[in-house]
Structures are given as structure tokens and as C-alpha cells.
Image (cartoon, rainbow, N blue to C red):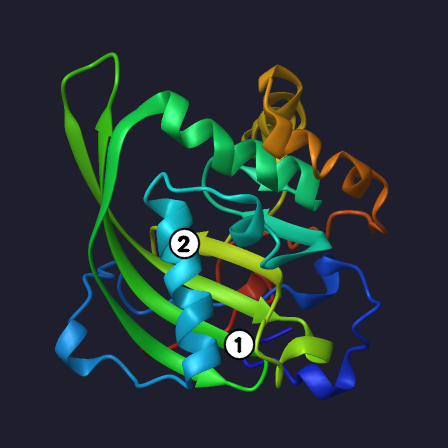
Amino acid sequence: MSSKLDSASIPSSAPGENFEPRQTHLSEDYTPDPSKSLPLSPARQRLVDDIIALYSCQPTIERVKRYTPDCVYDDQFVYANDRYKMAGQWFALPKLFKASKCEGYQVVKDEPGLIQFRNEQSWTFKIIPKTATINALVSLSLEPESIDSDFIRVKYHKDQANDKDYSHEGLGFSFKKWQADQVMKHIDSDEVKAFEADKGAAKEHVKQHGSGAAEGNAPVQDL
């Protein structure tokens, strides 16, 4: 599947795995230029605001509800394939980081089924007095059923910090999946427990691609 999703052709009931955007890029430099950000409708802007707040260690039940129960979250460290696991990730962040700040973002794609933005996020660790700044491309594949509503939901959330996509194979991926499967078990939080029923959400086998390059069903996109 290319990064351009034809959301109308995918039923909302299909598990999140079916909504994965695939892409490689000409550069791994995702530094945002907010002055060039594409304007969004009010409903889409509220969605992006909620996602930025989650990245910024401000999780709430309502913000996690931005995801469908069968959603997938996919980044260089985590592969979480339901909203219960997703909740564990977001509510764990304030326990790991003293602060997280969005330094700026730039919306680069606004399509019916897909929003993409470059995001610069600074993370300050709790144990180590150090701040790391990461630039990434965030892709939000949207639930077809809620695209035109006031509360748009996400089926697949991908965060890419380099030019290659994810192959979903090998030891690295096994660790990503193991990490996501474990975190929510160790978060004693009523907020995370609110999503416990979602661990039974529909799932499909992880789609393996053989490579994170163009030959791995990840066409080159010029942002």
C-alpha cells in the first residue's frame, strides 16, 4: 500500500494493519518549517493538537480515544497493535521523561484518509539530566467512518525518524513487539485499565515487507 490511502476502498471494520502507509524518502531530514505547514480543517487540527499533546507527556483518556480499538502504533522502538497497548505507551511517557516539548511541526500532506506532518520533539529524561531532540515524520491513517466527523479517529499511527520504512522482520521488530506487549502490564493506572477491553480488538498477522527500502513496498515519496 502506498502512502496515499484510498480510505473509501477500505471498510472501517478492517483491522488497523490494513491502513499502514508505506514510504521511503529522499532524505532523513524531517526538520519542520512551520511557516510552510498546510492548513487543516478545525476537526483535523483538533486531532493533530491531541496527538501533539500525547507526544508532550499529556495523556488523557479522551486523547487516547482518538485511536480505534484495533489501531496500530509503529515507530523505531514500538509496535503496538491495539488501543490497550497504545494506552500503556502514552501513559508510560510521563513516568520515563521529565518533560517532552514540541519544538514545531509542519503538515506536509492532508488527504481524505491520511495526515502527515514533520515533528520536532525534545525529550528530557528523568534519570539522566539530558535532553534529546528528534525530528520525525508522523503519518496518521484515518478511520473512514469518522473522516467527516467532529472527532476523527486514527487507524494506523506511524512515526519514522529516518528515510527508510520498517520491514517488520528480524530481532529488532521482535523487540518492538515484545516491548509493546509488556509495558501496559506494568502501568498501574486506572486510565490504562479503561482500555483493557480493547486487547480483544480484531487483529491480523503483522505484514512483513522484507525490506524498509522501495523494494519492500515502500515507494519513494518527495515531501
Percent of width and height locating residue 185: 66, 19
Q: Is there any visible trace of residue 20 in the rendered image?
A: yes
Per the image, the residue denoted by label 2 is 160
Dot 2: within a 10 Å radius of its alpha carbon, few (fewer than 14), some, or many (20 or more) residues? many
Above or below: residue 18 compared with residue 65: below
Percent of width and height locating residue 85: 65, 36
Work out how far the residue at label 2 is from the one at label 1, CA to CA, in angstroms.
15 Å
Say what amino acid the circle numbered 1 marks: Leu
- In terms of secondary structure, where does tag 1 sit? strand
Per the image, the residue denoted by label 1 is 114
Quadrant for the C terminus in the image:
bottom left
Q: Nearer the viewer, residue 171 or 7?
A: 7
Above or below: residue 18 compared with residue 193: below
Hey, which quadrant is residue 37 in on the image? bottom left
What residue is drawn where x is 53% and y is 34%? 89
Hey, which quadrant is residue 133 in on the image? top left
